[in-house]
Amino acid sequence: MATPAADMSDNGDVPKTRARVGFEMRTADQNIEDHLQHNSATKGRDEAELLKKLDNHFKDPYTRICRDRGIGRIPEKLILLPLVWFFCTYQLVLFGTDRAQFADFLERNNVAMKHLLLKDWSPDYETMPYPPSTGIYAIYTIDNLLEHINYTVTNVYNIPTTSVGSFFIRRTNGTGGKEKPVTVCLNYFKTGIYNEAEEKIATIDTTRKTDCRDIDKQSPPGYGFQPSIADLMRSTDGKLVRLLSVDIEFKLSSIHLNAETGKAVQCFGIHGTVFFDNRKIDGQITVKLKTNVEEVKCNSDSARNAKTQDIVISALALLFCLLHGLFCLQGWITSAILFKKTRDYYNDLTGKRLSTRACWEIFKLNDLILFFSHCVTIVGSVIKISIDHGLQTNYIISMYDATGILLGIGCLFTWISVLHYLAYDHVFGLLFSVMERSAFVVIKYLTCVSILFGGFVLCAWAVLGPYHIKFASFTSTFQSLLALVNGDEVYVTFTAVDSDKEIICFFNGFFLVAFLALFTLITLNIFIAIFNTAYEHQHDNEYKKEHRSDLLKFLGRMESKTFDTPTCASCVRSSCPSLLGCTSFCDEDRYNRKSYQFNT
């Protein structure tokens, strides 16, 4: 049985227990509240950090430098870009000058070869192919064919004594062995017999045979071919003309010394071919001369000094492009990481996915363009250094062409990317802004126009090709119609068809009128109207506000690119009076408050 003292003791513990329980409950609530506050603070810091990264990401380079009216850290890419721009441009100018002189040498060299080795060659054949000032350089009799062949072979051996240029007969091959400088090859059908009584082909074997002979000054008449060239060309005694072509290959050396410009001495090996083409067997043998020039090493101090200077410039251009390209790649990777964080945060907060347009607003296209241009320039610089160093001596013409394309494209995109660093004024980026806004509409429109244009090209080529010099081939038809859109030689195109062909002449006039009306009057005007509409939208703030991407609506910003407004200008002047710059997020809401949050 419990005593009263014991009951009092028990009753005295109850308030203590209740107090302890209450204290523990308050402590738990406080911990939960502290945890929530901690999570909220962490979330707020993450959000603020993300906002700061987005804000810095969309700033133009000048505004990044301006911090609290002082000069902040200058981006490495901004330091390297002028060096890249200078050395890429300087390298391209040097290469273009050198290549122009080389191309001029090749052209003059080729013309000299034609005058020296082709019988009855005239300067009239050296004009532009259109409009033709003379007929095709061709042979029509067997005697003329034999005369031309003998003339070419004889003059190859006489070229050191008859030419006013520095040409030498090349009697050694690439390994130092002796060889004859002239080779004549015949290409013909195996057999061909015609039955004159019944006027039909009795026997024909189109198997092609090739017979080649090395020729020197002591070679016998006809050069020892069996059957002879004359036998292969005669169509007597029931024999068909079987000769398809005659190739005369020759090897010469030449030295390029330009005393006017003082450029270094260059030595070249010339592999030439005079081609007598009778493959169509239509009574006309066309004659063509082709030369393949390769550079060989010259033992000249001036050549080595000049090449050393070019190599140094190319090496510097390669180095700065490599460094700047790495920074561009880093910027692209940073953009990808920022995009992933923004996409995840946007998805968690709204339950929606960011649009493709928003993705491209985060990714820096300028970095991608610069990285591509640097890669192209690096490859071109490596090839140029190999040419200057003498590592590439074969196929020098094709190497020059490839190098020119690579260096030209790289320099072009480098110059285009410079506009990114002039973003303080929207006029500098106006062209690309208008093109961006109209891109998808233009692509759809050009697809439709291309289909129509392809139909006109096929029709003109098939119907007018046999009677019209401009439409003789599919390629020339495409080029001629494309030139007509710009009003090129419209009258000549109308009158080039023989008036005796009445139906073709009428069709030619009707076709050209329909083409010009559709593509000159209608298509071009609609094309211009598309860009006019995009230009008007670019200056319409209400339109841009309604057609913002989901990311910009989410952020409450007008646009991701720079935009020249009085508010933005005042924002820049207040932060950095010494430089002109404009932040992409510089609008009234941003300027009037120091802290900002996502619009929800």
Image (cartoon, rainbow, N blue to C red):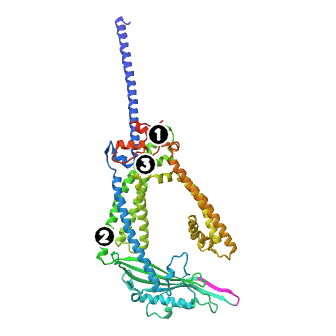
> Is 15 drawn above or below residue 594 in the view shown?
above
The foreground one among 397 and 127 is 127
Residue 69 percent coordinates (x, y):
32, 43
Q: Which of the marked residues, 3 or 2, is nearer the chain's N terminus? A: 2
Magenta highlight on residue 205: yes
> Is 101 drawn above or below residue 285 in the view shown?
above
Q: Residues within 10 Å of mark 2 (few under 14, many from 20)?
A: some
SS for tag 3? helix
Q: Quadrant of the N terminus?
A: top left
Residue at mark 3 to residue at mark 2: CA–CA distance: 42 Å
The foreground one among 160 and 42 is 160
- The amino acid sitting under disc 1 is Gly
Residue range highlighted in magenta = 197-206
SS for tag 2? helix
> Is 130 drawn above or below residue 214 in the view shown?
above
Residue picked out by circle 3: 336
Residue 311 percent coordinates (x, y):
33, 68
Residue 527 percent coordinates (x, y):
56, 56
- The quadrant in which residue 38 appears is top left
- The amino acid sitting under disc 2 is Thr
| Residue 53 appearing in the image | no
Q: Which of the marked residues, 1 or 2, is nearer the chain's N terminus? A: 2
- The amino acid sitting under disc 3 is Ala
Residue picked out by circle 2: 308
Left or right of 331? Residue 514 is: right
Q: Nearer the viewer, mark 3 or mark 2?
A: 2
As drawn, the label of residue 556 is 1
